[in-house]
Image (cartoon, helix red, strand yellow):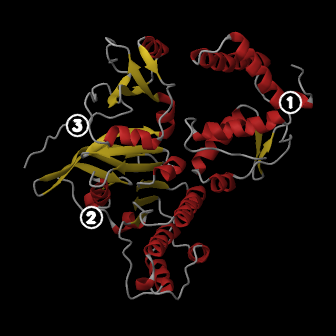
Amino acid sequence: MSSPVVTFDSVQRWFGNQVVLKGLSFQVMPGQVYALLGRNGAGKTTALRILLGFLAPHVGSVAVLGCDSTALSPQVRGRIGYVGEEHRLYATMTVAGAVAFEAGTRPTFRRAFADQALQRCGLRPSQRIPRLSRGQRATLSLVLAVASNPELLVCDDPALGLDVVMRREFLDALIDLLADTGCTVLFSSHFLTDVERIADRVGILHDGSLLVDATLDDIKRRVLRCVWLPKPGATLPSGPQVLRIGARRGGHELLLLDAQRALLADLAAHGELSPPLAPSLEDLFLDLTGPDRPGMLREGMDELVARPTPVGGQR
Amino acid sequence: MLIRINPQSPEPLFEQVVFAVKSAVAKGTAVAGEKLPSVRDLARELAINPNTVVRAYEVLERDGVIVRRQGAGCFLSDRGSDLAQSEKKKQLVLLLRHAVTEAFHLGFQPDDVKKALAQCLDELQFDGKRRQS
């Protein structure tokens, strides 16, 4: 297997006395599309800023394209495309100016691709950057990042503030990039339906570490979700097949991993069981990161759902 | 050939693409020699990751449903499946066992299952001949 493009190794980072990352570890392999999910404030942006070398980790390390993130050379930076949350662009420029500027700083910039993509998105070269809407700025940032054929594309919530049509345009641009170059992508997002279409692997970041680090296919194949209304006196299931038990009116919401037929039969025999189905990403996300409910278990999680690592570093 | 998927369905996306192509062949809406869309076109059409389409095409090629011609693209194979007859039978039994198990879980009786199977066969119109039920 080829070496990973991105490696987070037990990264911890705090701001003041607030711990944001509590031991974040994951890898992104070449050609993979990795979606980093998490609630607001979960630490997604901090993780991506550390990756790009804007912030240094307090404990642990991040390697990008084989280099340490705290010592990225301009050559390595040139191989990384970045679309930030704020879509920072020079306010004095026009669209054409921004394209010319980017083309001048990146040797791999594809001018024709950029012009064509901007035209398709309805951006005129003469438009001034401060007059662009949020969605137009996002599109411009993405086109500029994608046009230089990056080996690694990092996007921090690129679809935030985009309307449905713009989001699909963004997805199209990403698909084109992937089809053309087999580029590796790491992005954070709140649009789980888009993530389900495009991501190979997802990481669910919660409270500073990953709760889930798995391929979408694995989640669909191995995780089952069902509602169970137990008969009086029935005992709650436990063991490695049970990821989580949530409270529900008159019963429990179960999240099962690699559930065996014996377990399902046992549950059905001791209560009423809804047909077990693979959860949508949204269900899984809500189940795992929603407000804690009584009876929540996390002990049974194995390689699919990474165990939270305890905080080691103290100031 | 019409290829449709549902990203929210519990089936992995590449399996949905594989199934869509196989069922088009089974229904007879796609014929031998027909060219499949390029990876890029299908990925854009379905708005999914091109890697997923590549994976689906690899599975289809392995199963003998399509053939890849260098530089020309992928075409529906005219030999049907490359799998040996016995292997195919094994797969058929596995598939049906899965369906039958699920049906019993849902509380159906053998007669219900047989009726449902006959209905499915009817809908497919194997070899263009309507099956008598």
The label shown at residue A54 is: 2
Residue bearing mark 3:
A309
Specify whether B84 is left or right of A109: right
Q: Secondary structure at mark 3?
A: loop
- Give the residue displayed 31% in from the left and 62% down from the top: A72
Task: Report if residue A10 is visible in the image.
Answer: no
**Chain assignment, label 2:** A
- Give the residue displayed 41% in from the left and 55% down from the top: A187
**Marks 3/1: CA distance?**
56 Å
> Label 3 sits on what residue type?
Thr
Q: Secondary structure at mark 2?
A: loop
Q: Dot 1: within a 10 Å radius of its alpha carbon, few (fewer than 14), some, or many (20 or more) residues?
A: some
Please tell me whether mark 2 or mark 3 is closer to you in this view.
3
Is residue A131 positioned above or below B30 on the image?
A: below
Residue bearing mark 1:
B125
Specify whether B120 is left or right of A249: right
- Give the residue displayed 76% in from the left and 18% down from the top: B115
> Label 1 sits on what residue type?
Gln
Is residue A278 positioned above or below A210 on the image?
A: above
**Chain assignment, label 3:** A
Discs 3, 1 touching: Cβ within 8 Å = no
